[in-house]
Image (cartoon, rainbow, N blue to C red):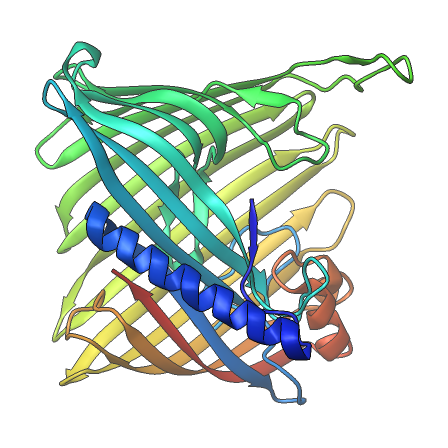
């Protein structure tokens, strides 16, 4: 399901494409008004330059999952969500939800164009508050699912996005239970795998405290190609188990602690994470994250990753804010030297409100990162923006970028 946002750049076809797009937008607006569509979403975009010229370069340490996102996001994200109730039955509401989202890093091309291309990241039907399902929600289609995120580094501790169906948030009093069947319909090497995510949330522990458990087994479904008489290559079984506890009212915010273990064949990952949000007074909010991971590869080699970082967000006056973010990562693969990277961002912002989470917001930032020689040798392996990072700063142990970014949700 793909929609090209930009018309082809050729005389008459350009005019026709513009007319078609205008007609489509008018029709969609009319339909949305008539159907009483709930419109929400998320958006971020920006532009920047490197001290060495060219566009902004983003920094990340190979072997680390974090990117310390303030002033360090070289991408576009556009996720408008349209949700409409199409029916009611015995107290439950039945909805259709669609999200024609865009995600692409700067400088990339996709489907033969350098313009932004949209795809339906979510398109599903759900019915909520179904009494025979313990007031849970039944759903089917493509959706974001089980997303548990640490905000300042944009990392998902749990994530089961894909195509599937399930029953969510069945309320049994002491807990809410969810179960789903998920596959990937986007092709690739793993399109024959399925998972069965199960989660128990809102298990009350102490005042303002709750415990959650996520269990996700994954298996392969195999078939034989009757034309070539070959079978799908066999893949290993997988299992992921995560346990998390949240405690509200700590330092004016929330404390999250969690552990996760996942296994795919002989490869394993074990990690522990701690996140604290809070209030320092004088209009300053803060967010601190610490994480440790031990990855054991199928070849028997281990890699240890340690990360710690934080952000402060201070209201100055009116719509103006000042933000500071500092993050440090250390990765030690077996048989290799220790890799380190430290990234610092200073930013000024103007926002639609005085709260730290007020959106939309516009930020002007400067980002500086330093790394050691072991990290320099593998900069191109950075999942964030590795190829360009190596091209621009592959001969140095530090780099700086300047830019402007906007972010909004509604």
Q: Which residue is drawn at 67% across and 35% down?
A: 187
Q: Where residue 134 sits: x, y (%)?
A: 17, 14
Observer-nearest residue: 168 or 118? 118
Residue 333 vertical placement versus 105 (above, below): above
Q: Where residue 259 sits: x, y (%)?
A: 41, 32
Quadrant of the snapshot with the N terminus: top right
Residue 73 vertical placement versus 127 (above, below): below
Q: How many marks?
A: 0
Q: Where residue 99 sits: x, y (%)?
A: 40, 48
Q: Residue at x 51, y 72 (%)?
A: 18
Residue 309 visible somewhere in the drawing: no
Quadrant of the snapshot with the C terminus: bottom left
Q: Is residue 3 left or right of residue 379?
A: left
Residue 191 vertical placement versus 406 (above, below): above
Q: Residue at x 10, y 22 (%)?
A: 91
Q: Which residue is drawn at 55% across and 50% down?
A: 65
Q: Where residue 35 sits: x, y (%)?
A: 22, 46
Q: In this view, does 321 lie to the left or right of 44?
A: left
Q: Image quadrant of residue 83?
A: top left
Residue 268 visible somewhere in the drawing: yes
Q: Is residue 108 left or right of residue 48?
A: right
Q: Image quadrant of residue 225?
A: top right
Q: Image quadrant of residue 246?
A: top left
Q: Is residue 229 left or right of residue 179?
A: right
Q: Which residue lies furthest to the right in this view?
A: 228
């Amino acid at each position: 399901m793909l929609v090209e946002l930009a018309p082809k750049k050729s005389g008459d076809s350009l005019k026709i494409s513009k007319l078609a797009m205008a007609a489509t937008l008018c029709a969609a607006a009319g339909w949305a008004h008539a159907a009483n569509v709930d419109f929400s979403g998320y958006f971020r975009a920006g532009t920047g330059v490197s001290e060495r010229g060219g566009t902004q370069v983003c920094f990340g340490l190979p072997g680390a999952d974090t990117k310390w996102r303030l002033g360090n996001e070289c991408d576009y994200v556009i996720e408008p969500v349209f949700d409409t109730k199409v029916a009611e039955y015995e107290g439950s509401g039945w909805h259709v939800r669609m999200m024609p989202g865009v995600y692409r890093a700067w400088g990339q091309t996709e489907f033969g164009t350098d313009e932004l291309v949209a795809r339906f990241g979510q398109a599903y039907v759900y019915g909520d508050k179904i009494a025979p399902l313990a007031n849970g929600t039944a759903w089917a289609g493509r959706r974001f699912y089980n997303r548990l995120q640490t905000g300042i580094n944009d990392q998902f501790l749990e994530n089961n996005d894909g195509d599937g169906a399930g029953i969510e948030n069945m309320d049994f009093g002491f807990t809410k239970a969810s179960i789903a069947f998920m596959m990937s319909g986007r092709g690739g090497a793993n399109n024959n795998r399925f998972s069965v995510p199960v989660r128990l949330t809102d298990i009350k522990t102490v005042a303002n405290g709750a415990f959650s458990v996520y269990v996700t087994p994954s298996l392969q479904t195999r078939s034989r190609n009757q034309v070539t008489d070959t079978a799908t290559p066999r893949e290993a079984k997988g299992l992921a188990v995560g346990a998390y506890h949240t405690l509200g009212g700590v330092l004016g915010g929330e404390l999250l602690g969690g552990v996760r273990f996942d296994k795919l064949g002989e490869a394993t990952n074990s990690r522990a994470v701690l996140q604290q949000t809070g209030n320092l007074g004088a209009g300053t909010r803060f967010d601190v994250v610490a994480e440790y991971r031990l990855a054991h590869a199928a070849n028997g080699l281990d890699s240890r990753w340690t990360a710690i970082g934080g952000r402060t967000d201070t209201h100055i006056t009116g719509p103006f804010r000042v933000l500071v973010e500092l993050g440090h990562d250390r990765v030690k693969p077996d048989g290799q030297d220790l890799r380190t990277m430290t990234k610092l961002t200073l930013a000024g912002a103007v926002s639609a409100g005085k709260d730290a989470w007020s959106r939309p917001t516009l930020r002007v930032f400067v980002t500086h990162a330093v790394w050691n020689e072991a990290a320099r040798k593998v900069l191109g392996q950075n999942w964030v923006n590795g190829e360009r990072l190596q091209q621009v700063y592959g001969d140095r142990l530090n780099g700086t970028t300047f830019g402007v970014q906007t972010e909004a949700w509604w």
